[in-house]
Image (spheres, rainbow, N blue to C red):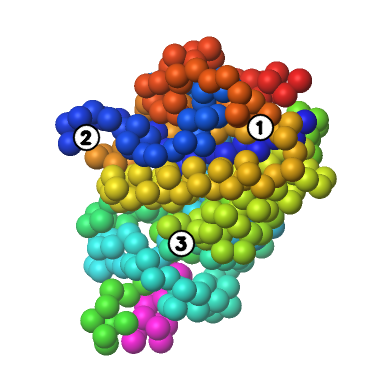
Amino acid sequence: MKILFVIIDGVADVGTPETQFKTPLQLAEIPTMNQIASTGLAGLMDPVEPGLSCGSDTAHMSIFGYDPFTFYRGRGAFETMGSGIDMQVGDIAFKCNFAYIENEIVKLRRVDREFPEWGLPLIDALNTQLKTSIQIQANHATEHRIGLKVVSNDYSGELTDEIIGTDPLKDNLPLRQAKPKVQSEKAIRTAKIINELSDSIHQMLSEHPINIQRQQQGLPTANIVLLRGCGQRIKVQNFQEKYGWKGAVIAPTAIIQGLGKTIGLEWHHVEGATGDYNSNFINKANKAIELLENDYDFVFLHIKAVDDAGHDKNKDLKIKYIQKVDEMLSYFVNNIKLQDAIIAVTGDHTTPYAYGDHTFQSVPFIISKLSLLNGKKNDIQFNEISCLKGCLGRFCGKQVMQIIKQYSS
């Protein structure tokens, strides 16, 4: 049995007076997802546990059956591995972005989304021009973000992820000093090393020709790297050993790539898949078809643009990209030759467009077989209200893979 598992990042929402309390899923035209909902099983899923607002990293860990309360060590390692940097168990890394600082105040946490023109040369500078006692390796991740691995030559194996990074999390607040989360020798030493690194980065970037030019043009300079989400490479049971399926991941978003690699899903590049509003969804569907029709039993396909629209507080854009996902699924259904294949669709958390950030509400989950899609239907649709009527009821993310496993057997 072949399985396509689609996670639409941030797809769930809440109703508002503006929409007569209908959610974007209820307002969108999504015939294929409604077809899956009405011919298979449906329910509402709490990604980690009821009432918990979670990030994409912890939500995905839970959904794939890896308890985040046991295994989670920060998102920096996922982001960095997803950017293409190899990490060993025990290495530490950060999810980072270039920022603008003035008189120790972070004026702009994100300098500019038009990243490649100025950002890629600055990443090269991080890798080649820093004057510091430690080694780092940086790489472009997704949009304006970078992954950054830290290796201490003097204290090999003696760094820890038990520190708080330098990001103040909001504009116009002081740059944080890295601090230990616990009063251990390792944590104290690591925080000291990271603060020295942050100072060295600031000095080098402030003198870089790109930033001198930006200053002359009246543009904010990218003169600091905010080091956040310190995490280390974790060791977990391999996905194929755990579930018996050879698995692949289609996800241009670095943090999801890195998580997939961590659990043993093989990442596959898709031309035109960018992890943002410009991503080519049909190419992603074609890659899923190719993988499932050949050696792979399970393909996880991640969609990010819907979540971006929620964060950007854009209702119409969120509806538009939900409908683009449905078009992608329609293409998949009509072009794959394996009519016994299974499709499961869900989200990883709620990102209400009216709020612009993650919240705690449940997300809809549906699963069906291609061979059933033109058969007898019920009245369930893919949205936050209707799916509660499904036979799966309400359940936690850690049960998702067992539901898929049972449905496929």
For badge 3, the amino acid type reads Asn
What residue is disc 3 on?
Answer: 278
The residue wearing badge 1 is 370
Q: Is disc 3 placed on a helix, strand or loop?
A: loop
Q: Nearer the viewer, residue 78 or 200?
A: 78
| Kind of residue indicated by mark 2 | Thr
The span picked out in magenta is 199-213
Q: Verify whether residue 209 appears in magenta.
A: yes
The answer to whether residue 208 is seen in the rendering is yes
Relative depth, front residue between 29 and 350: 29
Q: Type of residue at label 1?
A: Leu
Earlier in the chain: of badge 1 and badge 2, it is 2
Disc 1 element: helix
Q: Is residue 138 left or right of residue 317?
A: right
Q: Is residue 168 positioned above or below 14 on the image?
A: below
Give the foreground label among 3 and 1.
Answer: 1
Q: Circle 2 sits on which residue?
A: 19
Q: Earlier in the sequence, mark 3 or mark 1?
A: 3
- In front: mark 1 or mark 2? 1
Q: How many residues crowd mark 3 within 10 Å: few (<14), some (14–19), many (20+)?
A: few
- Quadrant where the image shows the N terminus: top right
